[in-house]
Image (cartoon, rainbow, N blue to C red):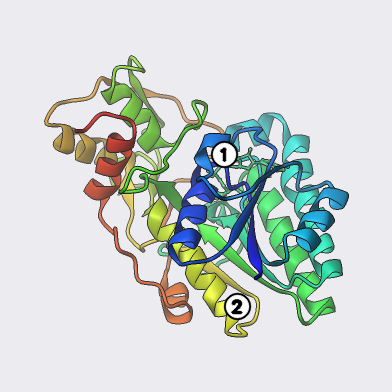
Amino acid sequence: MSAVLVTGGAGYIGSHAVFALRDAGRDVVVLDDLSTGFAEAVPEGVPLRRGDVADTAVVSRILHEDKIDAVMHFAGSISVPESVSDPAKYYRNNTCASLALARTCVEAGVNKFIFSSTASVYGNPEANPAPEDTPKRPFSPYGWSKLMTEQILEDLSFAHAAFRPVRLRYFNVAGADPARRTGQRNPDAAGLVKLAVETALGKREILEIFGDDYATRDGTCERDYIHVTDLANAHVAALKYLDGGGPGIVLNCGYGRGYTVLEVVAALEEVLGRCLNKRRAGRRPGDPDRYIADPTRVRATLDWRPQHENLAFILRTALAWAGALP
Ligand SMILES: NC(=O)c1ccc[n+]([C@@H]2O[C@H](COP(=O)([O-])OP(=O)(O)OC[C@H]3O[C@@H](n4cnc5c(N)ncnc54)[C@H](O)[C@@H]3O)[C@@H](O)[C@H]2O)c1
């Protein structure tokens, strides 16, 4: 029987995808170098191959020996501010490593490929909600490293018609598996929801609100938050789409509704029934004012309906995973 290779399957989103694939009855193999991932995030019975996606010898062996017929490629480096201070790391680990992986897949005849891209490819989109054909003007090396990979995958699909890459542009991913099987484990992850939850738990003294002079309704950045389990299920739906012969495609993954930083904090305070310790701070490099997905295409293309399209639910599952709720 064939299996799905999940690169970065020991990480936050990848581990949710591994559970979603297993729940859908698929065989899974994880390839992860554990640079920001955790072996314990990989469920029992799923082989964890420790290695670098850029290592073509390791990848070819896995593709062959584990009878891989589709790849979900989550592995990468994810910090926008770090990409501004160390761009070479991002072009190496996101762009060059993805090129090596994709080439190895093409050579091995593994043609179903699902790639973790990002709303950062849009920069500050000129329209919100942003459809997929919005002009791409990334603000950061992180966004460029992902946009370049999207282009590489598209060019490979032109040259090798059987190779069909689905490029999923995630908006802001948050929350945790409602069954608490996995969640955000990385202490260095810096998403708003995680930082706010840590402040609620007293692990962080104060929540900093970066920038209050953005072009949004209250001056703080506005984002489209998607529950990580809905996103994981979108990957399973993308795999079914490829199984059914669907061609390569780019799809936004978001709900089509934005919340500002202050609105997210207020929603968390409501769930908790108390105020968070917070203060306003300066802007961070690489943060655009607002981005909200136009999800029309993903809803029309995939057999996928979000189950957790609710900010309070996203926050509750993040709190529960962190141990802040019974
Ligand atoms: N978290 C978000 O909000 C978000 C938004 C848009 C896109 N993404 C993309 O989703 C993917 C997963 O993000 P995440 O939040 O789960 O991050 P994460 O850091 O939790 O997971 C990344 C995983 O990849 C592994 N890894 C990194 N480089 C590797 C390499 N060269 N070879 C093998 N393994 C490697 C890490 O050890 C880790 O387990 C990334 O590609 C990221 O760019 C994330």
Residue 254: x and y, percent?
Answer: 41, 60
- The part of the image, by quadrant, that contains residue 265 is top left
Mark 1: which amino acid? Gly
Residue 16: x and y, percent?
Answer: 46, 51
Q: Is residue 126 visible?
A: no
Q: Name the quadrant of the N terminus.
A: bottom right
- Classify mark 1: helix, strand or loop: loop
Farthest residue in the bottom direction?
245
Q: Is 264 on the left or on the right of 239, as rendered?
A: left
Residue drawn at x 31%, y 48% is: 179
Cβ–Cβ under 8 Å for marks 1 and 2: no
Along the line of sight, which residue is nearer the eye, 65 or 297?
A: 65
- Determine if the C-beta at disc 2 is less than 8 A from ligand 1: no
The crowding category of the residue bearing disc 2, from other C-alpha atoms within 10 Å (few below 14, some 14 to 19, many at least 20), is: many
Residue drawn at x 38%, y 29% is: 195
Along the line of sight, which residue is nearer the eye, 138 or 299?
A: 299
Q: Is residue 270 visible?
A: yes
Image position of 74 with respect to 159: above or below = above
Residue 86: x and y, percent?
Answer: 72, 31
- The part of the image, by quadrant, that contains residue 292 is bottom left
Q: Nearer the viewer, mark 1 or mark 2?
A: 2
Residue drawn at x 59%, y 38% is: 80
Q: Earlier in the sequence, mark 1 or mark 2?
A: 2
- Classify mark 2: helix, strand or loop: helix
Mark 2: which amino acid? Leu
- Determine if the C-beta at disc 1 is less than 8 A from ligand 1: no
Image position of 43 with respect to 324: above or below = below
Q: Which residue is mark 1?
A: 286
